[in-house]
Each structure stands twice: as structure tokens, then as C-alpha cells.
Image (cartoon, rainbow, N blue to C red):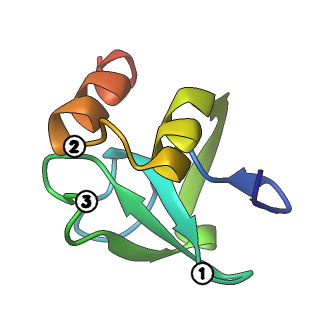
Amino acid sequence: MVSNGEITIGQVVKSRAGRDKGRVFLVLDIIDDQYVLIVDGDLRKLEKPKKKKIKHLMVYNTVIKEFEEKLKSKQGINDAYIRKLLEPFNK
């Protein structure tokens, strides 16, 4: 598991600042100690993830291990799958 302090790949986060404020995302990749790539399958798709500062994110304790495993094996990941994973957090 790739980790940066408190953020890991597959972690659920919520934007605290910017145009996407209040939206829930999944961490796709960790760039460095300040930036991550996030996707939600709707506004930010897998083809064009959002580069976001970690300090502008509210980090949930939920890590979706299934997402990280599928990402490593490159199977069955599309935008609809990401939307389905984030559905419980958008209510």
C-alpha cells in the first residue's frame, strides 16, 4: 500500500476548497507530500484526474482496498465503477 502520512491510494476524500468543494472523490495516485490525483467518475474521470493539494481535502477513514487491488491488476476499472463505489458517500 502506498501511503503518505494519512493518505493512501483508494482512500475516500472530500474537497474543502475550489470549484469542486463538497464533492467526494477517490485518491487515484499520490504525487508527492503535497499533491494527490483524485477521481469521482463524473466530473473527474479516469482519463483526466484532478491534481489537488492534500491540505484542501477532508480525509475520511475509509480506504477501499478493492479499488487499489483492481488498479494494480488493471482490470474492471471504469468511471461507472468509481461512481458506484462513491455512491454511499454522496448521500
Q: Nearer the viewer, residue 72 or 57?
A: 72
- The quadrant where residue 85 appears: top left
List x then y, in percent, for residue 79: 19, 43
**Placement of the C terminus among the 4 image quadrants:** top left
Residue at the (67%, 82%) spot, across then down? 34
**Residues under numbered marks 2 and 1 in contact, where contact means CB atoms less than 8 Å apart:** no
Residue at the (22%, 43%) spot, across then down? 78
Label 2 to label 1: alpha-carbon separation: 21 Å
Amino acid bearing label 3: Leu
Res 74 seen here: yes
Q: Residues within 10 Å of mark 2 (few under 14, many from 20)?
A: few
Label 2 or label 1, whichever lies nearer to me, is 2
Residue tagged by mark 3?
46
Residue at the (30%, 35%) spot, across then down? 76
Q: Nearer the viewer, residue 75 or 47?
A: 75
Q: Which mark is residue 31?
A: 1
Q: Residues within 10 Å of mark 1 (few under 14, many from 20)?
A: few
Check the image and report above or below for 26 versus 7.
above
List x then y, in percent, for residue 89: 39, 23
**Residues under numbered marks 3 and 2 in contact, where contact means CB atoms less than 8 Å apart:** yes
Left or right of 28 on screen, residue 63: right
